[in-house]
Image: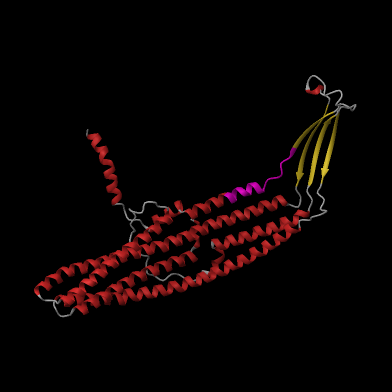
Amino acid sequence: MRFRFRLLLLPLLFSVASAHAAPLTLAEAETRLLQSNHAVLAARRALEGATADITTAGQAPNPTLSYSATDYSPRSGVGRGSLGDKRLDQTVLIQQQFERGNRRELRRTGAEALAQAAEADYADTRRQQRLALHQAWFDWLAATEKKRLLSETAELYKRGMVATDLRLRLGDVSRVEAGRLRIEALRAENEARGATADYDKTRNEVAFLIGEADTRQLEPALIWPPLQPADMAGTDLRRDERPDVRAANSRMQASERRRELARSLTTRDITLGAQVERDPATIAGVTYGLTVSVPLFVRYGYEGEKARAESDYYAAQEEGERIRQRVSVEIGRARADLAAATEKLQRIESETLPQAREVGAATEFAYRKGALNLNDLLDARRILRAVELEAVAARADHAKARAAWLAATEWELARQ
């Protein structure tokens, strides 16, 4: 009976444990991202396919075996007895094509270059999805902070309404002041509900990126990145190490191999064959032969393939240059955004926010003592709330700018 009772309690215990799950950290979210993100998984499958193409490209043509049997004499028939007694003209032919122009090696090296491009694409996909996770993650943290601040503001107004109702009955405040305070309380409650909706949206975005279906138990660990200047020196010199640039370089190599392969098509392949023929009408009975065949470029000399390969080669060169220029612009933009976001956050946290909190606390105290009117109180509360929300937005902007800078420069992290 006790054992059965404990079994019945297990689902309840598991539900309680899940309800008090530890907050999710950004490092844990990154681990889930690399394991379950759909874009990362698709890039991994593309890499596996490109690796398999190397084996396909490096194979030589298979030989062909053919057999033919023809009736020698329609009048006399094919004869009786075993197969050796049949009056058939039987031929066995085996043929092997020999590729020339180094085409097999060109195909293999081209496939290897595409596999290297797929590997770089896989690394770049991880880099981009990591950046997307960081952007969504810090939006989630900002929504969490905003939800907390606006909920505290709504609760503050709710408690203030209790005291105001009491003072209204005692005649200490007018109905107009009480009405204004009630309006502010309703506005604060609506803003708190909107913040809750924003929180749910950002949580769902993070859950999608990490492949989490159940979002109800997800809670973020409120850890903001440190406010410290980033090392912005020497990053442009390592531009060619970035995964998207490496992928473009590998595709340029592959296009060069395809161009050489198209040019080699005019080098004729040779097909050799060995034949054994059994002819009952001849004295020897069995004859042997050799065959040699080569294509004749009478009507077409692969002009289309060569022109297309030339076009693809120059297109790959232009795409590689475009990507390198884009990377330089991205690094410069990330540098400027991070510098501006760092300066703004430093100014808000060191000057604006402490002063707003000091003024807000002094105003609340003075209002409780009757030294200030309601207008001053409401103005001070609005200012404090606006500054606190601005500080949250500044933290999120700095964190996202820092993530964009790291994604644009510290791309070796994407190889892990």
The residue depicted at 21 percent of the width and 79 percent of the height is 375
Residue 371 visible to an observer of this rendering: yes
The location of residue 26, given as percent across then percent down, is 38, 58
The correct choice, above or below, for 163 with respect to 117 in the image is: below
Asked which quadrant contains residue 156, the reply is bottom left
Residue 223 visible to an observer of this rendering: no
The correct choice, above or below, for 87 with respect to 330 in the image is: above
The residue depicted at 48 percent of the width and 53 percent of the height is 38
The location of residue 161, given as percent across then percent down, is 17, 69
The location of residue 137, given as percent across then percent down, is 39, 61
Q: In which quarter of the image is the N terminus?
A: top left
Query: Magenta stretch containing residue 351, yes or no?
Result: no
Q: Along the line of sight, which residue is nearer the eye, 314 or 81? A: 81
The residue depicted at 29 percent of the width and 42 percent of the height is 11
Q: Along the line of sight, which residue is nearer the eye, 399 or 16? A: 16
Of all residues, the one furthest to the right in this rendering is 283
Of all residues, the one furthest to the top in this rendering is 81
Tell me where the magenta segment starts and ends, as one range: 49-64
Q: Along the line of sight, which residue is nearer the eye, 358 or 229? A: 358
Query: Magenta stretch containing residue 62, yes or no?
Result: yes
The location of residue 105, given as percent across then percent down, is 70, 51
